[in-house]
Amino acid sequence: MGEILLQNTLTGRKEPFVPLHKGEVRIYTCGPTVYDFAHIGNFRTFVFQDVLRRFLRLEGYRLKQVMNLTDVDDRIIQNAAAAGIGIREYTEKYVQVFLEDTRTLNIEPPEHLVRATDHIDDMVRLIEQLSRKSLTYTSEGSIYYRIAKFPGYGKLSKIDLSGIQAGARVDVDRYEKADVRDFALWKAPKPGEHFWETPIGPGRPGWHIECSAMAMKYLGETLDIHTGGVDLTFPHHENEIAQSEAATGKPFVRCWLHAEHLLVEGEKMSKSLGNFYTLRDLYAKGHRPSAIRFLLSSVPYRRQLNFTMDGLQQAASSVERLRNFVVRLKTERFPAGKGEAMPARARQAEEAFQAGLEDDLNTAQALAAIFDLVRDVNTAIDRGEFRQGDVPAVLAAMEKFDTVFSLLTDDDAEKLRALGFEVAAAGPDDAEIEALVAERQAARKRRDYQSADRLRQQLADRCIILEDTRDGGVRWKRK
Ligand code: AMP
Ligand code: ZN
């Protein structure tokens, strides 16, 4: 394995990654707030985190990853109270949906998937620790963090807070705070809403303290990697640093990784624009989990991802291309013997694949290495230059690819049926094939052989074989 470089939000640089404990990487991942279905923007970030963990394992590391489920916050408490049920009962449905959704996308479960409501004691202890260090104050039954006492505040997000006057009394949170930047560690109960009776008084935890408490409980005071979407950098992660580092006096996280946002047709995804998709919305339109996973992982995480239906279609054909290639390798009979060139080509692709990922998880580069291999091997096969003994080396490269991208197992239909979706027969229907064949014939007629070849390849990727007849016509069949 080569050197791993990761772009660290904290330092603003690409740095060599070396974990604190030999052979083991400790990662904390901000999980979903379980009051609604997660959307594909959320899954962009979750898929990135999955690619990260699978890649680190490929590099030989053991993993210790914690993901929280935010199952207490103002919306959850209000919605549960309005529905007249407990917050556990209210969030359980969304927890189950989230777990099901992650399974359909082949997102591996972290070593610890933990609920905020199971860790109230840990949060209370951390708040007590901060209070002993005079970093907190109480106002109207709520406990706040006094940011003026933490000199490093702002170091992650580089947000200039000088315009916000320390000491100004601005009521933004319906609570009285000494400084507008200060944030609630513990919130006083409101009438009729859920609260916990604790040594620091009745109430409920703030969002930020939840992550600090759970991260340090399972991973120690200093973690290797902390991930999330860019929107969490400020204030959430900045506040996590302030809480954790003030309590322990040690660096909280060595490397911060933030995934850029997913946009829809060039615009920010939002319910009001009607461009808001859950996985199930896309499954209902006939899209497959593997196509979504491909699309979400294909753009490097530090770049915005513009989601389009067109892009999703292309992702589906890319997955099909890869799967058909593996089927071809496993089922076709090639001339006996083993060459030198093809196994060497496969090893080179593996190296390029890994080098792409080692460069701050450049998934586009890693994918390009694999698609180049697929193209070269297909060409060699068509020329009769590929031998039976070359198969294992190429399959090994594809398997390595799949330990990270997890796309090759053809189980989409099964997954969708398990969720209750009707699944159309795999592959294009006759009308669609006839249209592509006619398009290719037209291209040949005007001597546009490049387009004709592209169309033939496109059909081949979907397991449709063309046979040109002597009279200039064409027959097609399914493989
Ligand atoms: P939430 O459930 O809102 O706490 O979000 C769960 C995760 O999804 C967080 O890491 C967010 O930063 C991330 N996230 C939210 N919206 C988007 C988006 N449009 N694109 C990528 N990630 C997002
Ligand atoms: Zn968090």
Image: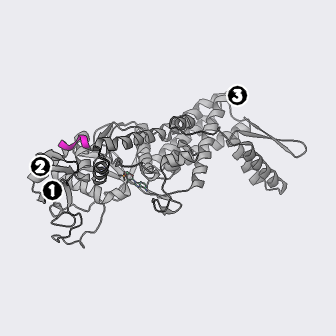
Label at residue 143: 1
- State which region is magenta: 117-121
Q: Mark 3 points at which residue?
A: 333
Q: Name the residue under label 2.
A: 200
Q: In which quarter of the image is residue 421?
A: top right
Q: Quadrant of residue 433?
A: top right
Left or right of 75 on screen, residue 103: right
The verdict on label 1 being within 8 Å of ligand 2 is no
Q: Which amino acid does label 1 sit on?
A: Ile
Q: What residue type is labelled 3?
A: Arg
Contact between marks 1 and 2 (CB within 8 A): the answer is: yes
Q: How crowded is mark 1: few (under 14 residues within 10 Å), some or many (20 or more)?
A: many
- Mark 2 → mark 3, Cα distance in angstroms: 72 Å
Rendered location of residue 299, percent (x, y): 50, 53
Left or right of 131 on screen, residue 438: right
Q: Main secondary structure of the magenta part?
A: helix
Rendered location of residue 253, percent (x, y): 27, 50
The verdict on label 2 being within 8 Å of ligand 2 is no
